[in-house]
Image (spheres, rainbow, N blue to C red):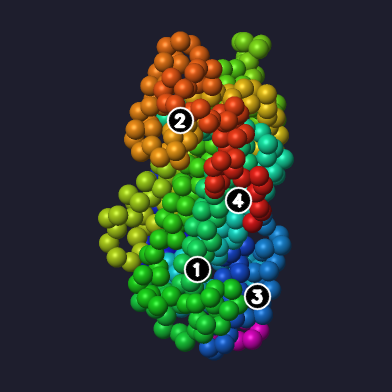
Amino acid sequence: MKLWQGRFEEAGDPVFEKMNRSLGIDAVLLDEDIRASRAHARALFGCGVLTEAEWQDIDRGLEQILTEYTPEQVKATPYEDIHTFVEATLAQKIGQAAFKLHTGRSRNDQVATDFRLFVRKAISLVLADLDALDSALTESGNANTDVLLPAYTHLRRAQPIRWSAYCAAFIEMFRRDRERFEQSVGRVDVLPLGSGAVAGSNFPVDREAIARELGFSRISRSTVDATCDRDFVIEFLSNAAIAMVHASRLAEDWIIYSTEEFGFLELSEKVTTGSSLMPQKKNPDGLELIRAKAGVMTGLLTGFLVVMKGLPTAYDKDLQEDKEAFFSAFNTLRLALSVLRLTVRTVVLNKERMAAAAADSFMGATDLADFLVVKGVPFRTAHETVGRAVRDAIANRQQLNEIDLMAYSPLFADLPADYLAPMNIVNRKGGASSLHGLSSR
């Protein structure tokens, strides 16, 4: 069965049919297509297109399809897409009344409605994933508030911070991701149904009633735009790509921090693998795959932007590519966030190794310059003075707290003996670097 076969005499070529068929991708929209079809049938009854008996038969038949089929079972059927499957299966169940269901509706506004319903649900699931990751990072930070490690700039030791401050950095990143997804819901929450193919419907269906039934907050204002708008897909892909970039940055840190050279972290065997050749290896494959998938996610966003950039106004079949990009991004993001959450919850901190790295007194050089500033020395002069001390300490293979600072400024006579102790350096700082505890959302 084809929904458009009346115009054609020849059968489609199998090669083209393979390209044109989208059921393997859009079968996942079964629930959404049934829901939207039931709402449309109710609207057709409301405007007199369907009798009450026809409407009840259609509604009952659609409900049966939903209880009898899973998306995986639907994929195994020979139909072109999810819409064709539903209509053909409904006809098998209730007869000719099924062919009235598509009155005043095009697959153009139908698929846009189905897809928006799915994307709205998808965002709620991603928000829950981000909340779970937030909780894992918050718990790790709060459980290790007195653990210090170096913060790095240019991948060189910069200043000591608490582990909780390190966790706070990624909590902020992922909370911004959450805000972006949350804000996008309002732009997804628009009902296209009733727009027809491009110019609207000839039947006075109550679009506001359909919107209420499907939980949309408003109806689309332009029938032309409603059928071809995929901004909500682009926005999801963009938000997902940014979130994956944040996940990749954390993954990169932890790949480095878990090396023997750093030794800050011990990754769980739950998220690592061994080598087929080298028995000693414990490889951070989970984190490496997250890092790689961030690149793939960026490609999905770029690819779909390129699909959209040259389309003439109104619906074009190019838009069929929206779902493959979206579902790939959605599934990849959820999996990555889950693996990252598991990694955070199971990691073991090597507190002694972190503390030893944080004890590098060169990371207190700025504090020494600020000490001189408090004594009245201009900062640029203080910076140069401490810089000379740093250079000489390195040349003599000493730590900054091991040399005679009085040789560089007599004002250091008042310097407390424990001034360069890592915890003192941290406690002198305001803001996130001195965080003792993190708050949950």
How far apart are the two marked residues, 2 and 1, measured between alpha carbons?
60 Å
Residue at position x 58%, y 30% in the image: 416
* Residue in the image at 63% along x and 15% along y: 281
* Amino acid type of the residue that numbered disc 3 sits on in the rendered structure: Asp
Residue depth check, mark 2 versus mark 3: number of the one nearer the observer: 2
Residue underneath mark 4: 130
Label 4 CA crowd tier, 10 Å (few <14, some 14–19, many 20+) = many
Q: Position of residue 313 (x, y in %)?
A: 29, 65
Apparent side of residue 279 relative to residue 404 in the rendered image (left or right): right
Query: Residue shown at 46%/10% (left/top)?
Result: 396
User: In the rendered image, which residue does mark 2 sit on?
Assistant: 411
335 and 177: which one is in front?
Answer: 177
Height in image: 258 above or below 395? below
| Of residues 108 and 151, the one drawn nearer to the viewer in this rendering | 151
Contact check, label 2 and label 4, Cβ < 8 Å: no
Q: Which residues are magenta?
A: 49-54
